[in-house]
């Protein structure tokens, strides 16, 4: 695949309220994530696209201006939920949130939009007969789970069937959708009055408060605030019944949603200048850290070939000069990111006397797990390139 010639679309108006948005941050030659190469002898780097972050002052929504062709991005999508402990933990937390809010036995069907490898639906297969996973790359170990291999944009939820009651789930999917309004409209049309919809995604509030702007990537087209998602839901007759924030995995916001009218209005404390200032703090932190490490650390390795390492390297360029990046995922051994120099090595080959920079820091869970692992290995020097852990 030629990662240098992916078709692009451009969006300037807010996907939630359609108002004109303002440029918040330019990201020239921004690296795509999740693409690896086995051609480690070829030192040419590829997979960089100019990107721009736009902010809507009206509904407090953050979104990407330049959208890479999703058919290319997701036809080559190798990420699975069960390969990431952080992703599994996030799904377990969603299950707990659902259990606190409803009795799942009252629903005869559970539909997961963007269900990936059906990890979430597998939590329910012992006591639910109708389990449906709608995902372009849908898979499942159990034959009990019905797979619909279509993108959300191309799928009509009304085609599922006229079940008496549905529990609808979508976890960390809506941020990938080019037209979230179309997605929400389809969900709303498929829902009866007693159906319930649970939605979770990375939130703008926690992106700003936790200063995790390295999580911005070409795949996450939309970063919703509580205000922007509420405005979008309300426009299609859906209402938030409960919510919770979770800073452990991609700054998640979880929602319980139904057609029951609820005056659940929230006033966001976000604005253009507050976010702009948070970005300044974030960039200054990494500029200073990069300068310090460049002067004082001459040879070091990374640990964790997490999918967001290229975006971390964008803000912390010394990552691209690491000797190696060690990782426990053997499928990545002797590969490298298409836009980075360091080769990924089996973690069993690591020398504990080297300086180690934790490179998989996109979530607090991942950072803490790697830190504990390196401490147990008695690694001599550990560097955590993260503001909040």
Image: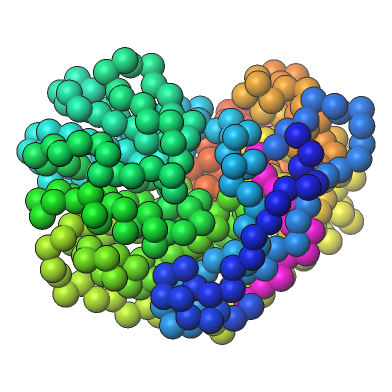
Q: Quadrant of residue 266?
A: bottom left
What residue is at 92 percent from the left and 32 percent from the top?
42
- Magenta stretch contains residue 73: no
Image quadrant where one finds the N terminus: top right
Near-viewer residue (113 or 254) = 113
Near-viewer residue (13 or 271) = 13
Q: Which colour scheme is used?
A: rainbow
Q: Can residue 252 be seen in this view?
A: no
Residue 99: x percent and y percent?
A: 17, 42
Q: Main SS of the magenta segment?
A: strand
Q: In this view, does 356 lie to the left or right of 193?
A: right
Examine the rendered structure and indicate whether residue 31 appears above or below residue 66: above
Residue 220: x percent and y percent?
A: 55, 54
Residue 26: x percent and y percent?
A: 71, 70
Near-viewer residue (71 or 32) = 71
What residue is at 13 percent from the left and 51 percent from the top?
192
What residue is at 55 percent from the left and 33 percent from the top?
79
Q: Is residue 93 left or right of residue 24?
A: left
Q: Can residue 221 be seen in this view?
A: yes
Q: Quadrant of residue 352?
A: top right
Examine the rendered structure and indicate whether residue 239 appears above or below residue 218: below
What residue is at 47 percent from the left and 68 percent from the top?
15
Residues in magenta?
24-34
Near-viewer residue (349 or 7) = 7
Q: Is residue 247 left or right of residue 212?
A: left
């Amino acid at each position: 695949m030629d990662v240098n010639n992916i078709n692009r679309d451009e969006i300037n108006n807010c996907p939630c309220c359609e108002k004109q948005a303002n440029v918040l941050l330019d990201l020239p030659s921004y690296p795509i994530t999740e693409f690896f190469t086995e051609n480690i002898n070829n030192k040419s780097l590829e997979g960089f696209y100019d990107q721009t972050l736009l902010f809507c002052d009206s509904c407090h929504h953050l979104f990407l201006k330049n959208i890479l062709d999703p058919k290319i991005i997701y036809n080559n999508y190798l990420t699975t939920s069960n390969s990431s402990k952080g992703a599994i933990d996030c799904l377990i937390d969603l299950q707990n949130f659902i259990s606190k809010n409803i009795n799942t036995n009252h629903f005869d069907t559970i539909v997961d939009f963007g269900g990936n490898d059906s990890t979430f639906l597998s939590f329910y297969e012992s006591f639910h007969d109708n389990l449906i996973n709608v995902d372009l790359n849908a898979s499942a170990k159990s034959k009990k789970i019905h797979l619909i291999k279509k993108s959300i944009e191309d799928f009509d939820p009304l085609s599922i069937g006229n079940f008496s009651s549905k529990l609808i789930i979508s976890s960390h999917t809506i941020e990938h959708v080019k037209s979230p309004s179309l997605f929400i409209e389809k969900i709303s049309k498929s829902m009866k009055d007693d159906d319930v919809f649970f939605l979770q995604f990375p939130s703008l509030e926690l992106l700003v408060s936790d200063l995790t702007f390295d999580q911005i990537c070409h795949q996450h087209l939309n970063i919703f605030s509580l205000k922007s998602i509420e405005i979008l839901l309300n426009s299609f007759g859906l209402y938030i019944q409960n919510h919770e924030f979770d800073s452990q995995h991609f700054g998640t916001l979880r929602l319980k949603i139904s057609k029951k009218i609820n005056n659940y209005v929230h006033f966001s404390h976000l604005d253009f200048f507050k976010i702009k200032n948070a970005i300044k703090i974030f960039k200054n932190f990494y500029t200073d850290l990069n300068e310090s490490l460049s002067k004082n650390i001459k040879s070091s390795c990374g640990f964790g070939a997490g999918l967001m390492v290229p975006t971390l390297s964008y803000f912390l360029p010394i990552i691209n000069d690491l000797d190696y990046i060690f990782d426990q995922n053997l499928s990545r051994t002797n590969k490298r990111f298409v836009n980075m120099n360091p080769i990924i090595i089996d973690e069993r080959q690591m020398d504990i006397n080297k300086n180690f920079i934790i490179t998989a820091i996109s979530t607090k869970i991942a950072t803490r797990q790697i830190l504990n692992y390196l401490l147990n290995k008695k690694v001599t020097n550990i560097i955590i390139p993260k503001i909040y852990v």
